[in-house]
Amino acid sequence: MRGKKLCCLLLAACLLLGGCGAESVPRSTHDGDFTPYAAPPFADAVFHEDRAETVDNVRVDLSALEEGYIAVAAQSASKLKFQTIKGEMTLTYDLPGDGTPTVFPLSCGDGDYSFRVMENLSENKYAPIYTHDCTVKLSDEFQPFLRPSVYVDYTRDSACVKKAQELAAACGDALEVVSAVYAFVTKNVSYDKQKAETVRSGYRPDPDETLSTGKGICFDYASLAAAMLRSQGIPTKLIFGYVSPNDVYHAWNMFYTEESGWVTVSFEVSGNSWNRMDLTFSAGGAAASFIGDGSNYADVYAY
């Protein structure tokens, strides 16, 4: 859409004042005319077996490209990778070799894509066993960020979705839902330093596990927040990038709302814009000087 600008979400502390949550009163009730937020129908992402094309031991479902995703299933005794390539941007994922379908987002938007399934030959050498080139035209730019996918994995029956529905029931609009999710996650999830020191390459977060254990790393925070907000119809990106001054490789979120901007003590939201939300630093009480004005964030990958 035209006229949109990227906007930073300033998260100065872990306490959110003025939002709604499990223990707070929705602002909309103050005028005595409260209408609960109504989430749109659940946007799912599934592997359509009957629509998938098969090449050797690879099955690829290309039927939902306009909905912002591609689904792949493959079988191999060797390690597999899946790549989405658009221009100079290549996103590479681990692909299960047991035939389990996996959903991958088309997070680079409209344009010409190349899809590849790569099989390991030796050490770090891979060879393509499936390739497909096509032009993607999304039904709208938000589709990849409204559905479950490989790094934001949930279903309509997930515990995190039920919790999001519970929080949203006390809210009057999408911005209040964002506020409620922010308050809930920062209050109920603590940073797992041991996990951060031992996590291995290829790790995939489980939002329900993060919700259940109440702890996680930045990847877990971002995945849980994205799952909760997406399930309520709020476009949310999971971002990987670097945060200065120490160039920390980090994960955070950006969400989008068309509603008018609003301000709380802890952060500022601009309407009709993508807004940055860093739950990891907020939950840890990071100082505003570290979070800064957003200029110290360098977005690299969006999922």
Image (tube, rainbow, N blue to C red):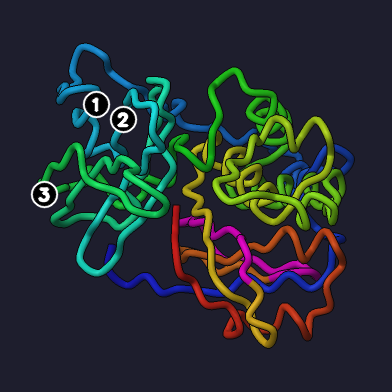
Q: Which residue is mark 1?
A: 58
Residue 143 visible? The answer is: no
Label 3 with label 1: CB-CB less than 8 Å? no
Depth order, front residue of 99/225: 99
Count of picture labels: 3
Kind of element beneath mark 1: strand
Q: Residue furthest top?
A: 50
Q: Of marks 3 and 1, which one's residue comes earlier in the chain? A: 1
Q: Residues within 10 Å of mark 1 (few under 14, many from 20)?
A: some
Label 2 with label 1: CB-CB less than 8 Å? yes
**Tag 3: residue type?**
Thr
Q: Which residue is mark 2?
A: 72
Q: Which residues are magenta?
A: 249-267
49 sits to left or right of 228: left
**Tag 2: residue type?**
Val
Q: Residues within 10 Å of mark 2 (few under 14, many from 20)?
A: many
158 sits to left or right of 281: left
